[in-house]
Image (cartoon, rainbow, N blue to C red):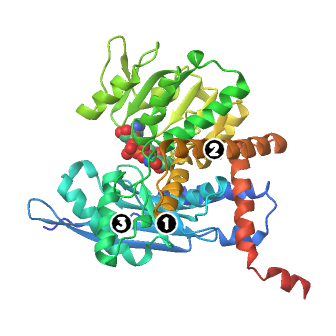
Amino acid sequence: MPNLPPPSSAATSADADLFARSLARVVQAAQHARIDPETLLRLSAPARTIEVSIPLRRDDGSLQVFRGYRVQYDDSRGPYKGGIRFHPRVDLAEVKSLALWMTLKCAVVDVPFGGGKGGIEVDPRQLSTAELERLSRGYVRALADVLGVDRDVPAPDVYTNARTMAWMADEYRVIARRLEPGMITGKPVGRGGSLGRDDATGRGGYYVLKEIEARRGWSPAQVRVAVQGFGNAGQHIAQLLHEDGYRVVAVSDSKGGILQPDGLDVPAVAAHKQAQHELPLPRGARRLGNADLLQLEVDVLVPAALEDQLTEHNAEQVAAKVVLELANGPTTGPADAILHRRGVLVVPDVLANAGGVTVSWFEWLQNRTGEPWSLAQVHERLRACMRTQFQAVHERATTQGVPMRMAAYGLALERLDRALGAGGTAADFARG
Ligand code: NAD
């Protein structure tokens, strides 16, 4: 019996629900934004949705077919931009939601990109490195026509990394018969990657937290932090906060978490995770479940794994004062309302994790000009960008008396409105 992919999950109501829920929050935010109603109409569905089959010859000689997606949501502000996720739960509704969030995120941080996202429904831990390379190249073969430096520029996401990007850039080079490094970002340094892209998402979140620290008069040693997800985003922010004197008391990965009330030795934890592919249990620490981590008595909670982690079922139990969303979509709408009522500051994903796409933009610029930037330049521009946009969103939230997510979405919608409306004809009809 061949390895057939399971029936498409795209149409199930639970999946469709995620996208409907994502869109509902945009509609809600539009009430606090000065935009033409047509803008909302234009943003209510992606410009293009592509589902592809990717055949993979397994190392044992068998053939397996994987389902892949690319959603190109909106490119009115620039080429589509968004990561590629390898995960068994990837489906069309998730990719559509992620592409919508990318559209908003690029507008929030005012980088000249639109929004897109991609993924393959696969458990990468079941594949060898050689199989992963063939699958990554297969993804590019299936989608090469719609990718490109001025069309659609992917990047890493969950369970993809710089090496995946290098394979994909190379496959694109073979197909296009020319070098076009700017068609994908998050590449290894030396293969067109930017210095500072590896920790950019965590660092962007860290810069945001420094703004909150300044406003709240925090002293880092007094601030306890829990980080859910110890991958690219989670690990780097944990490291940066640890170096800065913050007390990172708990971290977790897909198998569970560890808690050390005095603060974890984050570099040691990261080194162990790197070598053994699992979290250690340092002396004095104890294991805890992922659900427990979300309810720890900490000051800052950093969800850095997947969507829908804070819901109406656990939002009342969140003890943190600040939730910094490094993951995309970790907080549901009802949870947002509960956290807002309880006075918990939620820094939304479209701002908190925008450091990644910001440095992707720097990488794209370097690829286009051929001029490499120093690490100091990358950090300085990233810090300036995160500070400016945090201030804009924070000020708007304060003035309007709305949660930061609503303020960030509102700001993004107004920027998208300017782009979408610039070539529009609605006003002519109104005059006539
Ligand atoms: P990654 O694959 O490097 O890491 C994901 C981590 O989450 C892993 O440690 C994994 O074990 C853990 N995890 C998975 N399921 C979990 C669960 N149920 N509970 C706790 N931990 C779990 O991925 P990443 O790139 O760090 O992405 C994490 C999140 O950050 C995603 O939502 C992604 O979209 C978002 N993000 C990433 C970037 C980036 O540049 N990599 C940029 C913006 C947003």
Tell me the distance, in whole angstroms, between the alpha carbons under discs 2 and 1: 23 Å
- Of the numbered discs in the image, which one, if any, rests on residue 386? 2
- Disc 3, disc 1: CB below 8 Å? no
Tell me the distance, in whole angstroms, between the alpha carbons under discs 2 and 3: 32 Å
- Choose the circle earlier in sequence order: 2 or 1: 1
Q: Where is residue 15 in the image (x, y as percent from the top left)?
A: 48, 58
Q: How many marks?
A: 3
Q: The N terminus appears in which quarter of the rendering?
A: bottom left
Q: Name the residue under label 1.
A: 368
What's under tag 2, amino acid-wise? Met
- In this view, the residue farthest toward the front is 371
SS under mark 2: helix
Mark 3 close to ligand 1, CB under 8 Å: no
Q: Residues within 10 Å of mark 2 (few under 14, many from 20)?
A: many
Q: Which of marks 3 and 1 is in front?
A: 1
Whether residue 169 sits left or right of residue 194 in the image: it is left
